[in-house]
Image (tube, rainbow, N blue to C red):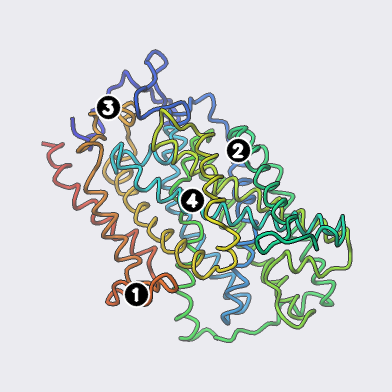
Amino acid sequence: MTDTAPPAIPPATQVTLPDGRVELAPDSAAPSGPYANEDLLPVPVRRRTWTTYNFCALWVGMAHNTASWTLASGLIAVGMDWKQAVFTIALANVIVLVPMLLTGHAGPRYGIPFPVFARASFGIRGANLPAVVRALVACGWFGIQTWIGGEAIYFLAGKLIGDGWTDAGKVGGHAWTMWLSFALFWVLQVAIILRGMETIRRFENWAAPFVLVGAFVMLWWMSDKAGGFGPLLDQPSKLGWGGDFWKLFWPSLMGMIGFWSTLSLNIPDFTRYGRSQRAQTWGQALGLPTTMTLFAFLSVMVTSGSAAVYGEPVWDPVQLAAKTDNTVGLLYALVTVLVATLSVNIAANLVSPAFDFSNVAPRKVSFRTGALVTSVLGVLIFPWKLYADPQGYIFTWLGLVGGLLGTVAGILIADYWLLRRTRLDLVDLYRTGGRYWYAAGWNWRAVVAFAVGGVLAVGGADFHPLVDGRPVPALRPLADYGWAVGLGTSLVLYLLLMAPRARRARD
């Protein structure tokens, strides 16, 4: 049986509802065997309950965090004014929304998570390649965001308890109370994730408006300190709108796209719970670009105000909040940072690797076990050292690996939309020897497209300080456009490599 002939899907194994959603036939046995478990199986239609608000709240909760806050601030630091910075971020998030919606379509339609979705193109075993790469990126970010959340608890408790907390004896270069704060934040996240996706949905619903209100409160406070909104808006551009701006614009745009490119892969982990395609489409369209643009605007305004008030821009919202003499205001700001960090870390950095690690050994690793594995790895990478040297890890390793994932998006889109016309066989996604088994569970065509696209995307990038120089100097002109190059190359190459197989299927 060929893997590219959608009309041949056995009708007895799955049913298609009038709205286009597909689920396993009620009278058929659920897939079993070494590649299936309860967490990886399709979500029944009755349990696909997330609404437009749930998806919108998910994005509000994920976008409003310390890393997002510093995106616009970083563009201001390299010479853009507020209009240029907000324009760059807004355009980037409109662009990344497109693959987000395309890959997210399989979620509400079939109720499957990202690693199972990837089996259609990479093979049932081969799907572990993109899944593990995605999971390792998430582990890195989970550890770093957990350390940031621990810092918020440390500062918050210090204001309540006093110097006895902040000046406690040091262990390993940090106060033992900082280690305790880190552990408390780690336990809090694990407790939420172990309660399942429904608890995450309720938490995101509550966190989203809380964080948004907190950002506006910070803007009001800074404008009051600066004497109005005028000083927040009059910071001029150092680049103008000529060649200097456009030279910086393109790499900045790719960097902003790369910020959420990882979620554009594993978004089916969330959309599989969607009530309809309309819910996930409108929820993401309203939640991602609008939220990121608004948050970028607030970040620019507050940061510009800090420059006017304190003589220099303060990029970190925790450090900025610490400058206030109002204890109530400080506590509110730090609690907001804490909730924001908790929200993005659970949604973006725990859900995905939990499913990804479960996909590696479905019979032995459940969703909850995968989440625990992620939590432990997030500590073992020593995030306190990585956060102290962001150039070597956040901006080099994580940035480059994240760029590679653009190539995976290209393969998924080509396979699902252009080859299969959005039609999948649910049972074969879990079965040895089916249409998605390819050769020993691997589709070598997807692996080749991933490798070639990845080399072109990051081969000319600067790996410093991990490696001196660029691995492939001749590819340096492509480095600033890595995400787009990887996605486009892998999409086209995958279609070319799959063409002979598709022709045999039609004959």
Q: Residue at x 19, y 38 (%)?
A: 439
Q: Residue at x 26, y 43 (%)?
A: 419
Q: Amino acid at mark 2?
A: Ile
In this rendering, the answer to whether 184 lies above or below 397 is: above
In three-dimensional space, the C-alpha distance between marks 3 and 4, rounded to whole angstroms, equals 29 Å
Q: Nearer the viewer, residue 391 or 24?
A: 391
Residue 278 can be seen, yes or no: no
In three-dimensional space, the C-alpha distance between marks 3 and 2, rounded to whole angstroms, equals 35 Å
Residue at the spot of label 4: 263
Mark 2 Cα-neighbour bin, 10 Å: few <14, some 14–19, many ≥20: many
The first of marks 1 and 2 along the sequence is: 2
Q: Residue at x 58, y 82 (%)?
A: 79
The first of marks 1 and 3 along the sequence is: 3
Mark 3 Cα-neighbour bin, 10 Å: few <14, some 14–19, many ≥20: some
In three-dimensional space, the C-alpha distance between marks 1 and 3, rounded to whole angstroms, equals 47 Å
Residue at the spot of label 2: 193
Q: Secondary structure at mark 4?
A: helix
The first of marks 1 and 4 along the sequence is: 4
Q: Amino acid at mark 3?
A: Ile
Residue at the spot of label 3: 9
In this rendering, the answer to whether 163 lies above or below 278 is: below
In three-dimensional space, the C-alpha distance between marks 1 and 4, rounded to whole angstroms, equals 27 Å
Residue at the spot of label 1: 470
Q: Mark 4 or 2, which is nearer the eye?
A: 2
